[in-house]
Amino acid sequence: MAVDAPTYILGISAYFHDSAAALIKDGEVIVAIQEERLSRKKQDSGLPVKAAKFCLDQAGITISDVTKIAYYEKPFQKFERLLETQIAQYPQTFFPFRKTVKSWLREKLWVPHNIRKELGFKGEFFYAEHHESHAAAACYASPFEDAAYLTLDGVGEWACASMGTFENNEIHQLAQQNYPHSVGMLYSAFTQYCGFRVNSGEYKLMGLAPYGTPQFVDLIKDNFVKISDDGSIELNLKYFKFHRGMRMINSKFESVMGKPALKPEKHISTFYKDVAASIQVVLEEIVLKSAEHVQKQTGKKYLCYGGGVALNCKANQRLIESGIFEDIFIYSASGDAGGAVGTALLCANQDSERTVQPVPSYLGKTFDATEIQQSLEVHKVVFTELDDATLLNETAALLQSGKVVSWFQGRDEMGPRALGNRSILANPSDAEMRDRINEMIKFREQFRPFAPVVLEEHASTYFENVRNANEMLFTFTATKPEGIEACVHKDGSARVQTVNADQNKRLRDLISKFHEKSGVPVLINTSFNRRGEPMVHSPEDALRTFFGSGLDVLVMGNFVVHKEENENVKIKDVRLELD
């Protein structure tokens, strides 16, 4: 009896930021990766050719085996919005209009042609709307069969926010908020005002907020944004420039705030910390009002929440603690990279019944012992190979002694959070550890927090009302900060990751061994990368980052590398090639 060939769908997101590819086999996500991990270009926005080929290679198939390619938005609708909004503001938009037309007519508008050319694909294309892709990633990756959904981000084609229901395996949109009245754009405007880069510095603004006092909330609401009871907003566009220029804000914005926008890399005074605290409060109000409205309109007990704004962990804490919904699900890659997963899932579920199964957090590649050893030997690195039990025992002892360990195991995480496979780990009991890692290893701002990864069964001992924490998407209040000071933020909260054997057995075993030695079931966990670089993907990336920073120990698979045993090892810095 003939067996039906498997159905493969390749999802792609591209041309804005965080391009990615994802492969689905018979409705199940089997591999996904962001282009930046392979190109080594932070937030790579190009067509994810490397990521797409990686997905095919990992599945052991060719492009001819792919039934459909699913794209995460509708290019002609997005181009229409760009033209319409820029022409309406002409001639102020002369330069952005010229840039838009040039880039879109040259490349971004011709998605099928570009994909066929680069990948040799000859099959059908499927297009989802941008916010539909966000909704699909949240809904189909969730454990829910009946839920409401909410998406919030900068902008897709026209939508900046959307809401609806997820019932009978189908997504039904009930309402959307259109450009330019965008909560994502509002938050990004303040990101730029506080000296950070738009589309990458928003998490810095969130991290800075606890250091300030929210004294400008009324000023922001009186001048820049009107918030309705249903969570919809109206921006006062005379203070913004994103709809007609190359910057987010204008001089009138700065006049209202009373100080000019902070230059990048400059000292952050108390004033800008207070601004960060204030816009964070405003964002949380919008999120909560939006969620309340969705619940009232749908009557659902559960919420699937997606879009780039859903990566704001502090707002997520307010949301989950509000009790508006009994439970909330956020996909780990809820931003644009996850659009590749969302559109592929949406396409796969058009013609089939959904089997409810969580989408794995780890969807990249496992490098075997031979690949790791070859990379070590090429660079003449002194290393030790240990059995599992010895490896865990010695690594835990190194962590207890104050060593900072780079931990490279299994498949890459999909999304912006390091969840224990491409991580930097350290002892949370050392109060100075945060400053050391920020200054000597991550080369980043001192206010940036680190996440605690804690054994699931011990989470309630250290943090209040912990749930839905295995993908590091919520902050929780620390009830017992003693002994874990280095990973508790200024406001007494922490972006918690809980871990169990089903999620990540090797990480759990390491923390358990550390617990035995130290009495603390928690480790600092931050992404294995340096400032301005993507998380490491390959052993080569790991070695380059390890020897280019102040890390003490590298553990790749069962191989251990000590910095002091390799003082003469030099590896060419890829950042010099990218500049």
Image: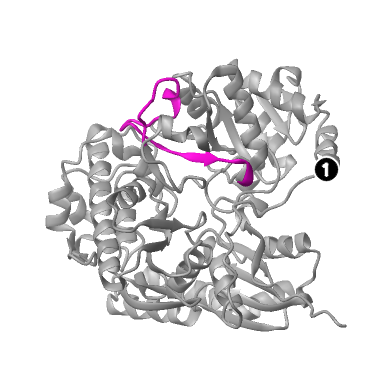
Instruction: Find the residue positioned furthest to the top.
Output: 401
Q: Quadrant of residue 82?
A: bottom left
Front one among 180 and 82: 180
Front one among 256 and 524: 524
Residue 514 rendering spot, x and y as whole percentages: 60, 23
Residue 421 rendering spot, x and y as whole percentages: 64, 41
Q: Classify 10 Å Cα crowding around label 1: few (below 14), some (14-19), many (20 and above).
A: few
Residue 569 makes an appearance in the image: no
Image-based side of 459 in relation to 345, left or right:
left
- Stretch in magenta: 477-502
229 over 407 or under it: above or below: below
364 over 477 or under it: above or below: below
In the picture of the structure, the residue carrying the numbered disc 1 is 371
Residue 298 rendering spot, x and y as whole percentages: 31, 72
Secondary structure at numbered mark 1 = helix
Quarter of the N terminus within the rendering: bottom right
Q: Is residue 81 magenta?
A: no
Residue 134 makes an appearance in the image: yes
Q: Is residue 487 magenta?
A: yes
Q: Quadrant of residue 516?
A: top right
Say which residue appears at 56% left-offset and 50% top-offset. Answer: 42
Say which residue appears at 34% left-offset and 75% top-offset. Answer: 86
Say which residue appears at 33% left-offset and 64% top-offset. Answer: 245
Amino acid type at circle 1 is Glu
